[in-house]
Amino acid sequence: MESELFIGLMSGTSLDGVDVSIIRFCDSNENKCEVLHSHYLPYSLEIRNELLALHFSGTNELERAAILSNQITELYAKAVNQLLSKSLIESSEIIGIGCHGQTIRHRPELGFSIQICNPSLLVELTKIRVICDFRSRDIAAGGQGAPLVPAFHQAVFSNPNINRVIINIGGISNISYLSKSGNLIGFDSGPGNLLMDSWTNRHLGKHYDEYGQWALSGSVIDELLSLLLEEPYLKLSPPKSTGRDLFSQSWLDQYVNIHFSPNDVQRTLLEFTALTISNAVSSHCKEVDEIYLCGGGAHNTALFKCLQEMLHPVKIGLTDELGIPINTVEAAAFAWLARQTILDLPGNLPQVTGAKGFRVLGAIYAL
């Protein structure tokens, strides 16, 4: 075979919807991949609200989680089948689907991370082998089970002549430092979009603050910013990972004064997000030559500008310049992880997750 086709399927912490991409890997170079086609389906408001609710204990949550898992899986299958239809590629040409599932709890300190999905149903609905449950094996080996995308970043974005940083800004922001020496550091720096999105939804009824325009109508509240920056997680050294289990709306509410103007809070959250990313890069990524952003937060031009100012004079660009569009990097990563599983190759990096060693990740659901 001259090339191999995999599908990557990702629904992240932002809870906005499903990203799915067809990725071609070249046999002659296992680290060479190409995004052939991509597709996106949004979550309905009902699904999004139920996902938010399941991040916390509640009545009949096991049954609700099982029902929602099937509903999400049906949406996954719809996204895959629509993508195949518009790309004119047959399901038989796809070696496997790498499916992350939807995280509803991430508690590696207690030995688990839950991503809901029904892989058996996904196989039935797509007629394609499915690879999923990528985090459990790493956690079983003493790791955080996250972040997993730095291994993919290293495989496709590293350059022996450049110290490069990849920053994925989803609901949570994660950072990969790809030094030209070959050493890699990867970790979750803290919030990405989730606090800003949650605050926007509460006050404007919108899922996100487009381009950060609402934030720009306000001013930074120094008192609030100082309180947010005291969060102990931000002072931890890698390896580390986080999620909505920590950075939730209730976490924010404990610091917000009722007299604060909502748009000033939004501006402060944008500053907080940019600072946590910038501080993490400055603290843990030495000798940086280039920085590239990906994920939904890369569309936030106000956040992009803040990061440029904070990290000046380092060049900041988008991963499109490296060959993978910002909206498809994580889907491509899980296609790559699925391929690693099929090839019986490790998918984790112990120095990133804290696991005892390299492990083959994922469970295979055969066609």
Image (cartoon, grey):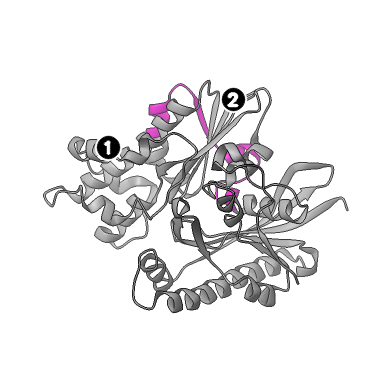
Nearest to N terminus: mark 1 or mark 2? 2
Q: Which residue is located at x 29 percent, y 56 percent?
A: 249
Q: Which residue is located at x 62 percent, y 41 percent?
A: 349
Q: Which residue is located at x 46 percent, y 30 percent?
A: 281
Q: Nearer the viewer, residue 143 or 323?
A: 143
Which three-letter amino acid code belongs to the residue tagged 1? Glu
**307 displayed left or right of 295:** left
Q: Is residue 290 above or below residue 140?
A: above
Per the image, label 2 sits on a secondary structure element best described as: loop
Q: Is residue 61 above or below residue 29?
A: below
- Which range is magenta? 306-330
- Label annotation for residue 163: 2
Q: Is residue 65 above or below residue 220?
A: below
Which residue corresponds to mark 1?
230
Q: Position of residue 303 (x, y in %)?
A: 39, 40
- Label annotation for residue 339: none
